[in-house]
Image: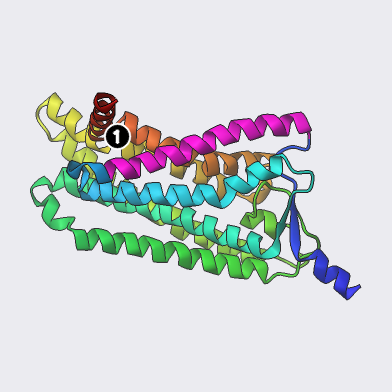
Amino acid sequence: MGRENQTWMCEFILLGLSSAWETQVFLFVLFLAMYLVTVLGNFLILLLIRLDSRLNTSMYFFLDVLSFVDICYTNSTVPQMLVHFLSFRKSIPFHSCVLQLCVSLAMGSMEFFLLGAMAYDRYVAVCHPLHYTLIMHGGLCLGLAAGCLVAGFSNSLMETIITFQLPLCHNVINHFACETLAVLRLACVDVSFNKAMVAISGFLVILLPCSLVLFSYAHIVATILRIPSAQGRRKAFGTCASHLTVVCICFGATIFTYMRPVGDSSMEQEKMIALFYAVMTPMLNPLIYSLRNNDVRSVLQRVLQKFSEKG
């Protein structure tokens, strides 16, 4: 019996999004297309920043890191989800589940801290334009990115360790991936401490960067309103529009997901919200920055023109 229990706990079964075969085939095609758009779009951002020296500024340094984080985050969950859509038995080894939770939490946490750092970059650019290059030098940018990485993995390791130290009653996870709240539902013991730690983690990872964003944009708005010409105000706001759009999407969806009582929604609603953040946000980021950012658009047009001339 002990050996059977040990084998049973070596893997988890993910229930996924649907048990109907026709629905799973449709979801496979849909999410495969979204996955390809996400990876190719973020790789395109990485490539464009390296192809044009005019994008070698702190703003695009953080965008470069954000695109890399989005690629890592997407690849931590979506490929496995795609495989499970076409699989009869949707299992994941115990160590792979631990790794998936750790990496996805780290990349998700790092993205929020990066958005906070990018908000500070926009604050310096709009409120202190004459000192922008002096303040946002390469050393500071690298330090902020490294700080985001350390903070993201510190939060992830803490949450992963306390989650998988719990005794589990069964191995069936009602989710499409290994997610903290879904794994906590498998526990045989009281998980009040773990839920409290998730709440504290949510405060540190979501509300602190969000507070920095609000502080930065409060000063940005005040500065923009003091600009006498309408053209100057539009130009100043245009430098922040892409970042502000991404901030609203990321913080809005995640705050709605995690900063509320667990019993307020069904598991299906939680899966849909988590799916939006796991799939939609990394796909939308490069689209927003390419469609709403004049510098990225102009570089893309020049690259396409060069390829057409060579062809």
Give percent across and percent down for residue 232: 13, 30
In the image, the segment drawn in magenta is: 20-49
Q: Residue at x 32, y 43 (%)?
A: 47
Q: How many marks?
A: 1
Give percent across and percent down for residue 12: 74, 58
Q: Residue at x 53, y 34 (%)?
A: 34
Q: Is residue 207 visible?
A: no
Q: Residue at x 17, y 31 (%)?
A: 235
**Badge 1 density bin: few <14, some 14–19, many ≥20, Cα 10 Å:** some
Q: From this view, report whether residue 4 is shown above or below residue 178.
A: below
Q: According to the image, label 1 marks what residue?
A: 241
Question: Which quadrant is home to the C terminus?
Answer: top left
Which residue of the protein is positioned furthest toward the bottom in this rendering?
2
Numbered disc 1: secondary structure? helix
Question: What amino acid type is highlighted by mark number 1?
Answer: Ala
The residue lying toward the viewer, choosing from 194 and 283, is: 283
- Residue 296 belongs to the span the image colors magenta: no
